[in-house]
Each structure stands twice: as C-alpha cells, then as structure tokens.
Amino acid sequence: MIHPLLSAALLFAPFVPKIVDYLSENDQNQVASKTLKIASDITLCDSPESALSRLMEEPELRESFVKDMTQFLLSLEASREDARGKNIDSARMRDMVLASMGSARRADWMVVLAALGLVGSLVALTCFKDMLSGEAIGIISTISGIFGSCLKDAFGFEFGSSRGSREKDFFYYKSQI
C-alpha cells in the first residue's frame, strides 16, 4: 500500500514528471512534503485535490509551480552531486593513504580477480561448449555476467558517471526554470 503523502504528491507528477524519480528514492517523504508545500503555497489551498484543480485551471499558477519544483529538484540534485563528489574524494584519499602505507591494494586485486574470473568463464564456455550441458552453460554464463558486472562497477566507481549525462540533466532542468 502506498503512503498517503506519496499518493498526494503523485497527483502533481503530470506537471513535473521528474517528481516520480525522486518519489521512488530514499528521501521520498522529503520530496513529497516539499511538493505538497509548494503546491499549497502557490495555490493557497489546503488539500492536494483542490490545489491540483487550481493548477489545472490557472496556467500562471501551473507555471509558477513548475518553476518552483524545478528549482527544488535542481537544488536537491546539486546537493546529491556534492555528496557524491565528497564521497569519491574521501574514497580516493583513503586509497592514497593506504598506498602510502604500502598496504596491499584491495581494489587492484578485486579488479584483477574479477577480470580473471570473466576470462576464465568465457574460456570455459568457448573451449568446453561441446561437453557442457545446457544448464552448465547457463550457470557459467550467469557467473560471467556477475564478473562483468563487478568490472562495470569498478570502472564506474573509478571514473564516475558520464559527465555528459549529468550536464544534460542539469541543462534540461535549468532550461525549465
């Protein structure tokens, strides 16, 4: 069953569809309550249903709602990006400290072992395909997918998300203001 606060906030998703993405995450109550607060402040209505009907009837209120929600979502995304950046910086600082102490680099071993596991799985599929049953091929294929996913995560952590994707989202929201 969906929480009443979330269902009320979902009423406003047709105006700012990106709300749905934020309502499915950890801080959904914060986004839902802020959505309802912005709607009630703009429309001067007490209930979400009456605020929704006013937004549908009055285009200038709708534009104001979209602008305020977009600014809120932009600030929320900026704070998340800041937190992600700090997290990556602290992880890299930790790696530099461990490297300076001469300790074994767990991350390097993780990547090497995941790559060896992937290569080993693919070699097994290629060299022994005639001797393997369909179930064994399925299991080994699943294992190679897991190793590939581990490598994808390691590269994603090391190099971060695509900068172009983040900039695209940022400029889209900025143009909506």
Image: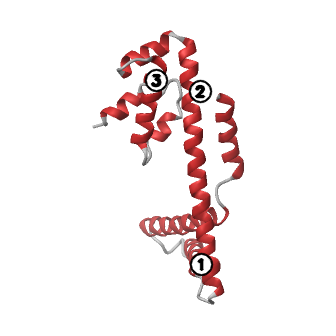
State the scheme by which the image is colored.
secondary structure
Q: Residue at x 63, y 71 (%)?
A: 92
**Mark 2 vs mark 3, CA separation in Å:** 13 Å
Residue at disc 1, secondary structure = helix
Q: Earlier in the sequence, mark 2 or mark 3?
A: 3
Q: Nearer the viewer, residue 140 or 88?
A: 88
For the residues bearing labels 3 and 1, Cβ distance under 8 angstroms: no
Pointer 2: residues within 10 angstroms few (<14), some, or many (20+)? some
For the residues bearing labels 2 and 3, Cβ distance under 8 angstroms: no
- The residue that label 2 is drawn on is 67
Assign the N terminus to one quadrant of the image.
Answer: top left
Amino acid tagged 1: Leu
Quarter of the figure with residue 159: bottom right
Numbered circle sitting on residue 41: 3
Name above or below for residue 176 compared with residue 106: above
Q: Residue furthest left?
A: 1
